[in-house]
């Protein structure tokens, strides 16, 4: 997907980019490729791949959820900033917090945000399990979002403790979302969530299947969750 095709594809979804936003995406791509030579951020470095499989794919959450306004969002395990930085570029009013376990990626994100002139962004080097125990952040976010981090049974324990009651946990998945959700349904329930909707669509050009799983936070998460770092992955809630 070339940059001009990216702009047009978003326009067809009701998202119109101004010149500044187009430049921010162009700069994002350049900085990503430059930093990727020093640290491993992405396997994709061709412009058309990055625009389609990182930028467009990240923004697809906004095709089904309203990201306008002063929302407070947490992105768990964002890596090189996906999906929250592309969403932030499109919707400048949102407040974005990213938590990631690798300091090198946090360094990249700080440099990226400074270069792009992004405001109302914060980056934390931490494990999501510890972050979710912190009283400052626990159950404080309108939306907690994650893309390609872990299966639903694990991801729910990392994300739902951070989601405020009546907030939304959004998991961006590929074609296995229904199977993952079946395996993780009890975890979602135990942690206070309830399935809202699953939106399934095809990524343009390559026609690979994507799923946006929306979990509504109905009840407070029991204090025992999240468990110690590594335990959710080692022994998921069943």
Image (cartoon, helix red, strand yellow):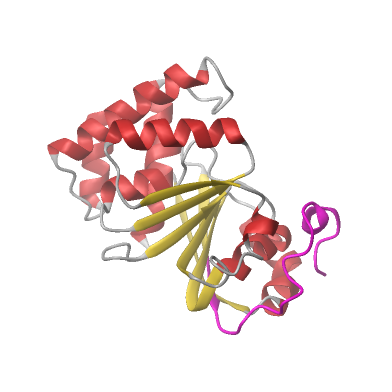
Q: Residue at x 57, y 67 (%)?
A: 162
Locate residue 18, reporting x and y percent.
14, 42
SS assignment for the magenta stretch, majority: loop
Residue 186 or residue 144, whichever sits in front: 144
In the image, taking residue 90 as reference, residue 55 lies left or right, namely right
Q: Residue at x 64, y 42 (%)?
A: 101
Locate residue 211, reporting x and y percent.
52, 56
Q: Can residue 176 be seen in the rendering of this structure?
A: yes
Quarter of the image with the N terminus in it: top left
Residue, far bottom: 219
Q: Verify whether residue 219 appears in magenta.
A: yes
Locate residue 19, reporting x and y percent.
13, 36
Quarter of the image with the C terminus in it: bottom right
Q: Residue at x 56, y 25 (%)?
A: 43
Residue 201, relative to residue 29: is it above or below?
below
Magenta region: 214-238
In the image, taking residue 135 as reference, residue 151 lies left or right, namely right
In the image, taking residue 120 as reference, residue 77 lies left or right, namely right
User: Which image quarter: residue 95?
Assistant: bottom left
């Amino acid at each position: 997907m070339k940059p001009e095709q990216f702009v047009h594809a978003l326009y067809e979804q009701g998202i119109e980019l101004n010149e500044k936003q187009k430049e921010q995406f162009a700069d994002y791509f350049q900085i990503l490729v430059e930093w990727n030579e020093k640290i491993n951020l992405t396997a994709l470095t061709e412009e058309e791949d990055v625009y389609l499989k990182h930028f467009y794919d990240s923004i697809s959450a906004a095709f089904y959820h309203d990201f306008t306004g002063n929302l407070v969002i947490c992105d768990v395990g964002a890596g090189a900033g996906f999906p929250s930085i592309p969403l932030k570029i499109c919707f400048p009013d949102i407040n974005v917090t990213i938590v990631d376990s690798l300091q090198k990626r946090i360094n990249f994100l700080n440099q990226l945000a400074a270069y792009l002139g992004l405001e109302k962004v914060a980056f934390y080097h931490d494990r999501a399990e510890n972050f979710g125990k912190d009283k400052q952040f626990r159950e404080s976010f309108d939306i907690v979002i994650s893309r390609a981090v872990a299966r639903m049974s694990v991801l729910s324990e990392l994300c739902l403790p951070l989601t405020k009651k009546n907030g939304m946990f959004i998991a961006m998945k590929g074609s296995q979302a229904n199977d993952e959700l079946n395996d993780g349904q009890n975890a979602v329930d135990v942690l206070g969530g309830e399935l809202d909707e699953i939106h399934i669509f095809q990524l343009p050009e390559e026609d690979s299947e994507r799923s946006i799983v929306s979990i509504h936070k109905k009840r407070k998460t029991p204090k025992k969750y999240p468990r110690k770092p590594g335990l959710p992955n080692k022994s998921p809630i069943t």
